[in-house]
Each structure stands twice: as structure tokens, then as C-alpha cells.
Image (spheres, rainbow, N blue to C red):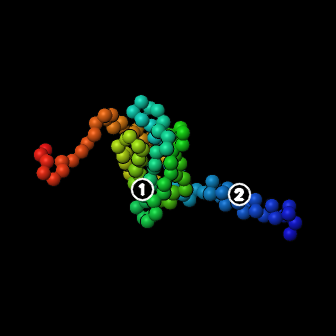
Amino acid sequence: MSNHSLRLAVLAAVLLPAAAMAGDRSAGHVAGYVQDVQGMPVAGAMVTLVGAHSPMPIYVVTDSFGRFDGSALPDGKYHVQVESSGHPVEVADFSIESGQRLGLTFTMKANYPGVLLTGAGAGEGC
């Protein structure tokens, strides 16, 4: 096999499955945006998608514009959790069907700055 043929074979092996998945109508597509209460993007937030019939969660991290993409999801019900430092956890549930495109927006509430929550230790009063 020549170098040119080998390159074409490798290129086809890489690009054809990706192209097939991009056009895959047998799966749902969910994407979204994570923002703070001022409407500013929250970069680096961890978005966890858990399917009702799937033992493996899907983890995605928001980009610098607060966007995330959890594409190619099988049909079903999902629980989504968004975590970001300095914000309480946000959660939601959704269902998706083959070929459906779903957009989600999460607004992360701010923790109260300067407030430290602590518990009472043994022998301390409340």
C-alpha cells in the first residue's frame, strides 16, 4: 500500500464515523447555556447528564461562552446537574426522542459572599 493510499484509508476511518454521527437522526441532541444571575456566561461548569436507563453518566464542561453540548443521546428520560465553584448546584429533568434537538439554559445563583456556614461541634451550643 502506498503512503497516499494509507493516508486516505486513515482519513476515511476517522472522518466517516464522525460524519455518520453528525447526521445521526436516531439520537437526540441536547445543548445549552450556563449563566450567572447577571446573564454572564459561566465557563468551566461541570454538566452531568444521567439517563434513566444508562449506568454511565455523560460529563461535559462549559466553554468560555458558557455553552455545553451533550449530543447523540439515546431516547429516554435524563437528569442533568450543573456544578460550578461559588454557585449552588442546579438540577433539571428532561426527556428526549430520536431526532429531537433540545436547548437548556441554567442560571446559577450566587452564594452569599462572606458567609461561612458551619455546624456545631460536640459540646458546643447552637
Query: Which element carries disc 1, helix, strand or loop?
Result: strand
Q: Is residue 22 left or right of residue 1?
A: left
Residue bearing mark 1: 78
Compared with residue 107, is residue 98 higher up or lower down, i.e. above or below? below
In the image as oriented, which residue stretches furthest toward the bottom? 1
Expressed as whole percent of the image width and height from the top left, the position of residue 103 reads 48, 44
- The image quarter containing residue 52 is bottom left
Compared with residue 31, is residue 41 higher up or lower down, i.e. above or below? above
Q: Amino acid at mark 1?
A: Tyr
Q: For the N terminus, which image quadrant?
A: bottom right
Residue bearing mark 2: 15
Which of the two discs, 2 and 1, labels the residue nearer the N terminus? 2
Compared with residue 25, is residue 65 higher up or lower down, i.e. above or below? above
Of 76 and 116, which appears nearest the observer? 116
Q: Is residue 98 left or right of residue 106?
A: right
Q: Amino acid at mark 2?
A: Leu
Q: Is residue 17 left or right of residue 2?
A: left
In the image as oriented, which residue stretches furthest toward the top? 38
In the image as oriented, which residue stretches furthest toward the right? 2
Is residue 14 among the parts visible in the rendering?
yes
Residue 24, numbered label: none
Is residue 100 among the parts visible in the rendering?
no
Expressed as whole percent of the image width and height from the top left, the position of residue 59 reads 48, 54
Callout 2 crowding tier (Cα within 10 Å): few <14, some 14–19, many ≥20: few
Q: Report, in whole angstroms, how far the alpha carbon at label 2 lies from the one at label 1.
A: 29 Å
Of 58 and 16, which appears nearest the observer? 58
